[in-house]
Image (tube, rainbow, N blue to C red):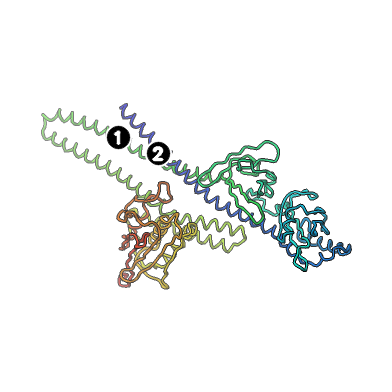
Amino acid sequence: MTGLRHRRSWVVLIFLAVVAALAGTVWRYGYLQALEQLARRAEGDLALASDRLSTELQVYQELAVLLTDHPMFDALDDPARRVAAQAQLLEVADKTAALDVAYADLSGRVLVSANGLTPEDVSGTAYFRRALQGALGSDHGVRAPLNRRAYYYAAPTFDATGHVRGAVVVVADVASIELAWPGNAPAVFFTDVNGEVFITNRFELLFWTRPPGGIGLVPPDGPAPEFRAAQTGVHEIWNIRWGPYVPERALHLQRHLPIVGLTGEILVNAAPARRLAWLQSSAVAAICLAFGAMLFLATERRRTLAQANAVLETRVARRTRALSEANALLRQEISERKEAEAALTRAQADLVQAGKLSALGQMSAGISHELNQPLMAIRSFAENGTEYLARGRADKAGENLARIADLAHRMGRIIRNLRAFARQESEDVRQVDIVAILDSAIELTGARMRQDAVTIRFVRPDRPIWVRGGDVRLGQVFVNLLTNAADAMEGRDGKTIEIEVAETGPLRVIIRDNGPGIDVPDKVFEPFYSTKEVGASEGMGLGLSISYGIVQSFGGDIRGENGPDGGAVFTVQLEPWQAEQAA
């Protein structure tokens, strides 16, 4: 008994260790997936902020260029013309919100200024020296007499001989550009070549600089706050305590802006990604523990019944030996009863165990694999709908909501079909359009294909082609084939999937890719056979096995082979729909 308890304790400990390892794997995978989605949104936010900054500054750049040919800069030696030119420049500055607009001669002396905020001599500035070379000059910084953050543009003016005779200087107020940014946007800041934060929507980070190590930021004065950087997959995560409006755990991305001479950087809160990963791993651990508890109780019950049966057999044998000499007929009846009871007990135990294992196999083999594609599409349409609502485009948001409702209805049909397939039931064979089913599969996998830069070439017939089958399950077959082709071509250039409907001879749907091909074509339709790496998305090895069963249930056939030019070729043969068959 002690040895049995010891073995049971080891089994429980091993099971808990496996569950912990599985939950950790799910957490890691879910966290990386969530960070990938967060990075895509952060890249969009950073691109939007960078484009907004470039557009704002471009207004002042174009203003400087447009003013170079203005006649008000002619004959500024006349005091009256200077007064008139100053009035015109003041009007331009007021209309464009520029801090100052000025004109300097060839020596760098400012002859006229809208607000008088430009230094009287700009000959030593980099932007003016660039303008003297006949090109557009630009610079930024905090300089007297402004003592404010400003961006400078200098455009050269030319005389009748084509020589530079001066420059138009336009000074942009950086603070006014920052005030126009949304207040609920992630933390964005722009650093110059010296690593100093010059523009940001978090004013507490203003003038922070990059330390000598090249990672993070330190304030211009005072001690450096806590900072740690970690690499999670391909993503850089910063653990910081820089203020109440900067996330403590943030995903860091950057983008170079050579046009304005700055580098845009963004910090996006990574806490939601961790919460989602914990939720997924907790759900997997809870399911595994529940299954383990049920299996443990079933095993304990079976062991108890076996012990009781052994005790009963011992007692019956003892009594049988006592009565065997008295009545041979009674001995025979008792022996037959013992055999019947033992056979019944074994049959009941085997039937209960087989039923539980069968139900478990049916549920785990279908639901997680079949619902992933519609769920990904629903999530994509939901994100698009949210974005359209934010932009005030209710009609487009309504279209996305309608597609979500359609996909939810389709998921319900998929669940019913999976239940029927798991019970070895068949969906009613009816007339379906294989062209429409292929269009639906291509649309369902469109986001994945665009993300992986996969080109789908579908030689689409210009009319419906009717076959015997079910639209939901046939659609899932082609979704599985398309996603498997995309997975096989991962890391390659020029990824292409070709789809052809051949009507000569047996009706066939041919799907080709330019991936590495199939290692063992004879095993590709076996359950749990997969060439994907452990932990890879959808790498359970059930997709092609389920697809094979679906096509077989409709009287068709599916086979996979390697093409003559490389890549995999899957051929799905289906039975055409004929009126006499329907009759």
Tag 1's secondary structure?
A: helix
Q: Would residue 59 be seen by someone viewing this image from the given angle?
A: no
Residue lying at 78% horizontally and 62% vertically, measured from the top left: 165
480 left or right, relative to 109: left
Q: Is residue 219 above or below residue 44?
A: above
Residue 36, horizontal then vertical, whole percent: 52, 50
Provide the residue designation for mark 1. 303
Amino acid type at circle 2 is Val
Q: Residues within 10 Å of mark 2 (few under 14, many from 20)?
A: some
Residue lying at 81% horizontally and 61% vertically, measured from the top left: 89
112 left or right, relative to 414: right
Q: Which comes before the other along the chain, label 2 or label 1? A: 2
538 left or right, relative to 202: left
160 left or right, relative to 315: right
Q: Quadrant of residue 438?
A: bottom left
Tag 2's secondary structure?
A: helix
Provide the residue designation for mark 2. 18
Q: Would residue 385 be seen by someone viewing this image from the given angle?
A: yes
What label sits on residue 436 in the rendered view? Answer: none
Of residue 373 and residue 581, the one placed in the foreground of this image is: 373
Residue 452, horizontal then vertical, whole percent: 48, 57
Figure label count = 2
Q: Nearer the viewer, mark 2 or mark 1?
A: 2
Residue 203, horizontal then vertical, whole percent: 70, 46
Q: Quadrant of residue 209?
A: top right
Q: Quadrant of residue 320?
A: top left
